[in-house]
Image (tube, rainbow, N blue to C red):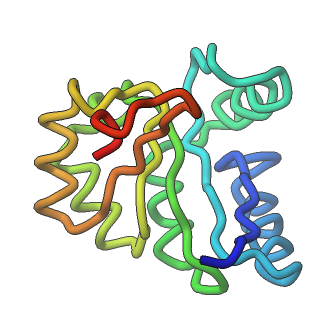
Amino acid sequence: MRKQLIPYVTGGYPTKEGCVELLNACAAGGADQIELGIPFSDPLADGPVIQATSHKALTGGVTTDDLLAIAGNFKAAPLLFMTYINPVMQYGEKRFFDAAAKAGIKGVILPDVPPEEADAVSAASDASKVPVVFLISPTCSDERIG
């Protein structure tokens, strides 16, 4: 397996139009895939940069529907959504994953959802054929990974 360049862009930052410009710059710079972050009001697991860009995007009025539209129109590189479970649950798991599939999203990274607690998300993911990407730590056992 070869290494890939997968940059992260906060959706709607610095503006909706500026976000598209950043996505295009990432693709032009050789990104194999791009993580498009769906801003969340309480990004406690993120550092100060993502917290600040998420806050700016949200105060600028960006919504999940806006990012689905951006994703649906962006074809220069594959996109993955990265977000917290709260926006997905608020949108509705099935509705979210169906809309992500329609927009061409290649996967959804949910860093705050352990697989053991992801039944509704996994069912919606399976039905839409948009995989959930779970994060694991270097100390995770083979049994849990499997």
Residue shown at 57% from the left, 20% from the top? 41
- In front of the other: 91 or 34: 34
Residue shown at 22% from the left, 32% from the top? 118
Quadrant assignment for the N terminus: bottom right
Q: Quadrant of residue 24?
A: bottom right
Residue shown at 22% from the left, 54% from the top? 125
Residue 90, placed above or below residue 99: above
Residue 28, placed above or below residue 19: below
Q: Position of residue 40 (x, y in %)?
A: 55, 27
- Left or right placement of residue 25 versus residue 87 in this view: right
Q: Quadrant of residue 36?
A: bottom right
Q: Position of residue 66 (x, y in %)?
A: 51, 54
- In front of the other: 106 or 53: 106
Residue 80, placed above or below residue 51: below
Q: Position of residue 95 (x, y in %)?
A: 20, 50
- In front of the other: 26 or 73: 26
